[in-house]
Image (spheres, helix red, strand yellow):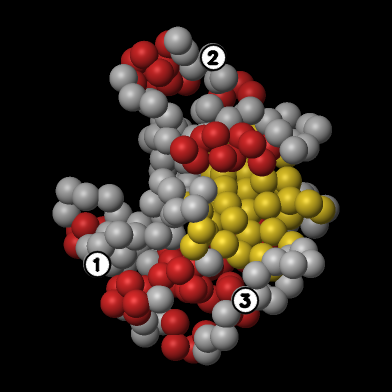
Amino acid sequence: MNPIRRLLGRPLPPRVAIVQAELDRFDGARYLEIGVNTGVLFLHVRARRKIGVDPLPAVPAWKRALHPNTLRRGRLIEATSDAYFASLRSEERFDVVFVDGDHAYRQSLRDIENALARLAPRGVVLVHDCNPQSAGAASPDSRDAGSGPWCGDVWKAIAHLRATRAELHVETLDIDFGIAVLRARQEGDRRAIELDPALIEKMGYSDLEANRAELLGLRAP
């Protein structure tokens, strides 16, 4: 068994396999992760070029030292996502981008739109924490979640994109607190939703509960 798996004493979260499956579609995949935190995802996925961005990364030193897929195969940048995207050269592109940074609606939407602008042909943007299961988990304030999982109101960013970006296919896998998948729309894809984006900011958890499948494009993984 992988030594890190033994040390952690628990299986890897589903997002690791999902991201790796997307990366494996490309020869020489270029991967960007917004919001690295403790490195649970960033350390495990394999890509020819791997960049993680976080203003306050919390990857433990022992993980850096012992992990077989070490940070030497990737670059960790301590910066805000806004600062990082602003620093990129105009030709910079990524095949897979995983967004798991600030969980506020407006900031997560900005991260996603910046990621889409840097996406290579056939590329995909994946967004974590967009299917909260309680009002506390969906609150913009992490303290409202108590000791439970916190997703913030990232779900509003997904609803916004489903309502405004007809050229995109946006759906959410009902797994791992919700993983949204954004890629170029193909013939036969499900239609986007009709929703005034000006109303999204005022929506609450009760609105999500009443129309979760439609707002998120929810489907089984």
Q: Secondary structure at mark 1?
A: loop
Say which amino acid is labelled 3.
Ala
Residue marked by disc 1: 135
Q: Position of residue 218 (x, y in %)?
A: 49, 62
Q: Earlier in the sequence, mark 1 or mark 3?
A: 1
Left or right: residue 205 versus residue 70 is left
> Which mark is on residue 192?
3
Q: Residue at x 61, y 64 (%)?
A: 170
For marks 2 and 1, give the CA distance: 39 Å
Residue marked by disc 2: 68
Tag 1 and tag 3, C-beta contact below 8 Å? no
For marks 2 and 3, give the CA distance: 42 Å
Where residue 129 sits, quadrant-wise, is bottom left
Q: Residue at x 59, y 56 (%)?
A: 181
Using the image as rendered, state which of residue 102 and residue 86 is in the foreground: 102
Q: Residues within 10 Å of mark 3 (few under 14, many from 20)?
A: many
Q: Earlier in the sequence, mark 2 or mark 3?
A: 2
Q: Position of residue 111 (x, y in %)?
A: 56, 61
Residue 180 in the image: above or below residue 55: below
For marks 1 and 3, give the CA distance: 25 Å
Does residue 93 appear in the picture of this structure? yes
Left or right: residue 127 versus residue 207 is right
Residue 30 in the image: above or below residue 149: above
Using the image as rendered, state which of residue 97 and residue 73 is in the foreground: 97
User: In this figure, what is the number of numbered marks?
Assistant: 3
Residue 210 in the image: above or below residue 94: below
Say which amino acid is labelled 1.
Ala
> Which mark is on residue 124?
none
